[in-house]
Image (cartoon, helix red, strand yellow):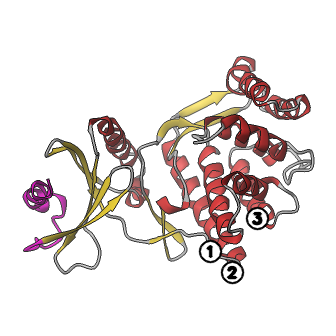
């Protein structure tokens, strides 16, 4: 199979990398995940030129097709921001395995750091992500959704009621979130593209800005403008909690991560709040609605364990009457 991949790269090199001298040889670095990731180097090069994603079997083919199509769709709309996404080059089969080839993006992977300088780095990473996300959403807006009574019922109140009952969440907590939803009545929100898996290991930095975002297979084209932001905060805080509190169970780490978004006594929450406020203000909304949209994000979150446990633990943290966003002036 690798020989056939070598032949494919050799045949297409002048098309895929016209400004890069054709190498006499190519070398490969394999990385195993749910699928095989192959980094393609020109002989003697320090950085790869291409990335080949190889599905282990045919059920992986639709996911590779989805990522390929998502990249084509987004790069066509992003203008100068398209350079922060890989360029899809090939989708097909090699030795009977589905394969997608894309360009390699350079940059430093965003990694939450330990306690010595975490406040400074946390603020820096959040600001870089916010700048990129606003620009990305501006370029990928596909329309607007008016939150009338029917939409509020279908997309917020009924979903929160159902999840609350199933997870055994108190009625007070559910009512708090539904009251926040009522604050959206007759407001219009843009529908934007979302990455769908925006955690730190998919983000590349250079000179204090986001220079690359990878892994677009879960991207959607008509999402709310806050889902990517809350996923980024949650995943970043989860990783930071792992480094600062080694030995805790995953469940306790999840609670710490959510507390780091909403607890008024959390340094993380107080550092993130001005950025969240700025994102909501972009769309003419108060950040008092942050608990509502984080809850809607959780309802779509692909949690690998007991989903009811997640909601039962998260709802009281998110909807606590003293959360960091409570009591703020509406815009």
Q: Are marks 3 and 2 in contact (CB under 8 Å)?
A: no
What is the magenta segment's predominant secondary structure? helix
* Magenta stretch contains residue 303: no
The residue at which mark 3 appears reads as 268
* First-in-chain label (3 vs 1): 1
**Left or right of residue 45, residue 265 in this image:** right
* First-in-chain label (3 vs 2): 2
Q: Nearer the viewer, mark 3 or mark 1?
A: 1
Secondary structure of the residue carrying numbered label 1 = loop
* Magenta stretch contains residue 21: yes
The residue at which mark 2 appears reads as 117
Identify which residue is drawn at 80% across, 67% down: 267
The residue at which mark 1 appears reads as 113
Given residues 325 and 42, the one toward you in this image is: 42
Q: Disc count in the image? A: 3
Secondary structure of the residue carrying numbered label 2 = loop
Q: Quadrant of residue 179?
A: top right
Q: Which disc, if any, is residue 151? A: none
Identify which residue is drawn at 91% across, 32% down: 172
Alpha carbon distance from label 3 to label 1 = 13 Å
**Left or right of residue 59, residue 175 in this image:** right
**Above or below 24: residue 166:** above
Secondary structure of the residue carrying numbered label 3 = helix
**Left or right of residue 10, residue 163 in this image:** right
**Left or right of residue 189, residue 35 in this image:** left
Residue 205 image offset from top left, x and y in percent: 49, 70
Q: Residues within 10 Å of mark 2 (few under 14, many from 20)?
A: few
> Does the image show residue 186?
no
Alpha carbon distance from label 2 to label 1 = 7 Å
Q: Are marks 2 and 1 in contact (CB under 8 Å)?
A: yes
Find the magenta span and give its range: 1-25
């Amino acid at each position: 199979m690798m020989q056939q991949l070598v032949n494919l790269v050799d045949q297409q090199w002048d098309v895929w990398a016209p400004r890069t001298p054709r190498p006499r040889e190519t070398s490969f670095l394999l990385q195993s995940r749910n699928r095989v990731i192959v980094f393609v180097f020109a002989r003697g090069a320090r950085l790869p030129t291409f990335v080949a994603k190889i599905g282990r079997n045919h059920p992986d083919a639709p996911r590779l097709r989805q990522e390929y199509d998502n990249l084509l769709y987004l790069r066509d709309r992003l203008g100068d921001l398209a350079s922060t996404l890989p360029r899809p080059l090939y989708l097909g089969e090699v030795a009977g395995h589905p394969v997608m080839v894309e360009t390699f993006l350079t940059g430093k992977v965003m990694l939450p750091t330990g306690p010595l300088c975490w406040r400074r780095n946390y603020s820096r990473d959040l600001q870089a992500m916010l700048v990129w996300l606003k620009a990305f959403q501006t370029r990928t807006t596909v329309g607007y959704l008016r939150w009338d009574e029917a939409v509020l019922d279908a997309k917020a109140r009924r979903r929160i009621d159902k999840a609350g009952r199933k997870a055994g969440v108190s009625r007070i907590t559910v009512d708090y979130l539904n009251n926040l939803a009522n604050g959206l009545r007759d407001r219009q929100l843009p529908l934007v593209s979302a990455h769908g898996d925006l955690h730190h290991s998919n983000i590349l930095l250079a000179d204090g800005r986001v220079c690359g975002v990878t892994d677009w297979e879960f991207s959607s084209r008509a999402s709310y403008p806050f889902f990517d932001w809350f996923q980024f905060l949650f995943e970043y805080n989860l990783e930071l909690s792992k480094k600062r509190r080694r030995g805790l169970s995953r469940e306790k780490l999840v609670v710490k991560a959510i507390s780091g978004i909403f607890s008024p006594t959390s340094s993380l929450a107080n550092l993130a709040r001005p950025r969240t406020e700025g994102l909501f203000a972009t769309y003419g909304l108060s950040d008092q609605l942050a608990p509502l949209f984080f809850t809607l994000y959780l309802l779509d979150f692909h949690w690998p364990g007991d989903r009811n446990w997640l909601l039962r633990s998260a709802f009281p943290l998110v909807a606590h009457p003293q959360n960091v966003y409570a009591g703020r002036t509406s815009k």
